[in-house]
Amino acid sequence: MNELNKIPSFEKNHNTLMPGLHESGTANGVTTWDLRFKRPNCGDFLEQAALHSIEHMLATILRSSDKKDGIVYFGPMGCRTGFYLLTVGMNRAEVVKLLKQSFTAALELDFVPGAKQEECGNYLEHDIDGAKAECKKYIEILNSELVVGTNNQPIKN
């Protein structure tokens, strides 16, 4: 096997990485956004059932938005500290606006989309209340005066 390349996510110093919206880079026209909910390695992680529900809620809302053609992927980080959003043709301001709208829309849901047994591989593991609580916290990060950007540098919203 050839030597393994270090992926951009692993090149970030997770000891200093803060919650926020991080632009991880663009390759082949696809921009990867790191929606960091929790500070890594500090013992505070997203509960699995809430993370699972956020994944269903946001993936559905984003793919139903007027920017759906620019959404490539939305999914959880294995470390349970946040999510990845992959976009095409969207700048930071558009992504921040879309995320604010999408997380606000998630708070209005009274069900988790795609959470029926025939729709989900682990349909018993959902927590809409926990998901909404985490979404509220992330909206506060997005609404703060500064949103963390590339290389953990603050960017004025």
Image (cartoon, helix red, strand yellow):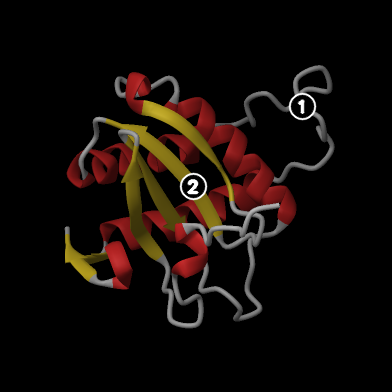
Q: Which residue is mark 2?
A: 84
Amino acid type at mark 2: Tyr
Compared to residue 71, the image places residue 26 above or below, namely below
Q: Residues within 10 Å of mark 1 (few under 14, many from 20)?
A: few
Q: Residue at x 53, y 56 (%)?
A: 82
Q: Which residue is mark 1?
A: 120
Q: How far apart in space, not on screen, are marks 2 and 1 (Cα)? A: 20 Å
* Quadrant in the picture for the C terminus: bottom left
Q: Position of residue 154 (x, y in %)?
A: 23, 71
Q: Position of residue 119 (x, y in %)?
A: 75, 20
Q: Nearer the viewer, residue 154 or 13?
A: 13
Amino acid type at mark 1: Cys
Instruction: Point out the tag, 2 or 1, that comes first from the N-terminus.
Output: 2
Q: Quadrant of residue 67?
A: top left
Label 2, secondary structure: give it.
strand
Label 2 vs label 1, nearer the camera? 2
Q: Residue at x 37, y 21 (%)?
A: 68
Q: Position of residue 151 (x, y in %)?
A: 31, 69
Q: Is residue 145 visible?
A: no
